[in-house]
Amino acid sequence: MAEFIGRATQISELDKMLSKVRADTSSKPGRALIMHGRRRVGKSRLAEEFLERSGGPGVFFAASKQTTQQELGHFAQAVLESNIPGKEDFNGLSFGSWESALKNLARILPGEQGTVIIIDELPYLIESDPAFEGTLQKIFDRELSSKKVLLILIGSDLAMMEALNDYGRPFHQRASEMSIPPLSPAEVADMLKLNSADALDAYLITGGLPLVCQEWVAGMSMSDFLRESFNSSTSALIVSGERSLAAEFPPTAQARDVLGAIGSGERTFTNIGRAAGGLTQTAINRGLVILKDKRVVVGESPLSATKSNDTRYRIADTYLRFWLKFVAPNIQEIERGRGDRALERVGTAWGTWRGSAIEPVIRGSIERIPNPNVSGASPVVGSFWTRSNEPEIDLVVADRSPIANRVFEVGSIKWREQASFDSRDMKDLVGQRLQLPGADASTPLLVVSRTGFSVPRTTNLRMLGPDDLIGAWR
């Protein structure tokens, strides 16, 4: 098994939950956890690692989108391959229902050790058997909760997994929740042994997906990694995007057309419609609803002290943003062994694309950095624009979104390969500050640069570079 990287926070939380189960002397020591996150962020790998480290009995079952009877057979086999005492009782058994299978599992569980039961790809089971959710709730209440059991339910359909705990659903208030993000920029930097600026480039390409990062040899340059990946049509960088989309969207779905348009760089409703092949407004709206529900796309509004109805859309997943721009359009050439052509296109468009793609990553980092200009609640970080893009402001730090009561900072991002943030950039920012509703000449400034600054530091100016952005995640 490949070396396990990162996830110290999640492993610690799981350890604490299992410890509480083992120490609980009540009549209901069993606990449940709903673990969700986007596809290929490493949820299953994390759960397997935790199960192995737990040192106790456990079973890992992953659904595979088959018939209920086939899934029941795979479940019985998973129990037989586990280290649960008494698993031999499952030899030769054939279950006609999930109720029977789960009851039999509960019957053989040891009393004091603390057993981990992992059910992966839960949405597949619910799709194939709509009664599964209610059955699981009944068995948990009547059987599993009275055992020293930690039941972990895993799924990638974020909307479905988050809804499991909703009022009126069978599992309401029976489980804690854990959201599994991709590896953070700091974890990517540590894993790949890169300096902060190069690590942020790597993060834009890999999105922090563990499978993709594992193919990036520590210390390897971006160009070398892309060359190797584009020369192999089976590399994780190439195949992960299509596999993720295929699991959620049929190739002919209108949502795929809308997603492709946004991935190509279109952000407004009108331009998305044009790029998606002239879809009707109804079709575009339907596609956007699906994509937002799946957390693949986010709609953003300008952040300022006034209301705006000008929504713009972007790809929420960092890896998918790169894949849609540079991999998807070149798949056929990569499969024909002409990855060199795809690599040339990356080289041509990289600087401009990176300057835009890094912005949401930077905003996420800034939200984690202590801010001397803010007291009280954590600030939100967004951007501001008008329909004409005059002005278009990279960073707005405020007390709430999308309509702020107070603007704490106005900022600019210059993510260039060589040139530093200079006096001309500062002059532009000062002018933009006066055009932002809610800001004035006294509002502090925030500047972010990949390659340093050639402007004097002042008391009303905060400067952040790659090391600061990576450090925000440590």
Image (cartoon, grey):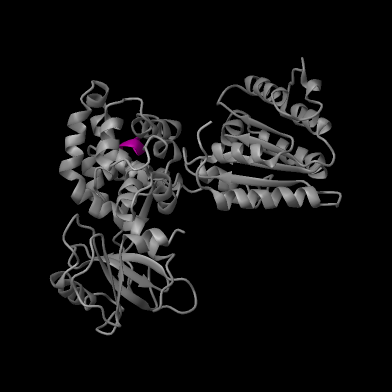
Residue 362, above or below 374: above
Residue 357 sits inside the magenta stretch = no
Residues 19 and 62: in front is 19
Q: In this picture, which residue range is highlighted in magenta?
A: 254-258
Answer left or right for 209 relative to 169.
left
| Residue 45 image position (x, y, % from top left) | 55, 37
Above or below, 441 relative to 314:
below
The image position of residue 152, as x and y in percent, is: 65, 41
Q: Residue at the bottom extreme?
A: 442
Decide: is 347 above or below 334.
Answer: below
**In the image, 268: left or right of 253?**
left
In the image, 306 versus 240, the foreground residue is: 240
Q: What residue occupies the far left of the structure in this picture?
A: 424
Corner quadrant of residue 439: bottom left
Residue 421 visible somewhere in the drawing: yes
Q: Residue 316 location, x and y as percent? A: 38, 49
**How far from the left and from the top, in percent, is residue 178?**
58, 50
Residue 58's quadrant in the figure? top right
Q: How many marks?
A: 0
Left or right: where does residue 446 sit relative to residue 23?
A: left
Asked whether residue 314 appears in the rendered view, the answer is no
Residue 68 is drawn in which quadrant? Answer: top right
Q: Residue at coordinates 67% horizontally, 34% vertically from top-left?
A: 132
Task: Tell me which residue sits at (20%, 77%) in the image.
Answer: 430
Up the image or down, 131 lies above or below 9; here it is: above
Q: Which SS type dominates the magenta stretch? A: helix
Examine the structure image and report whether residue 256 is included in the region drawn in magenta.
yes
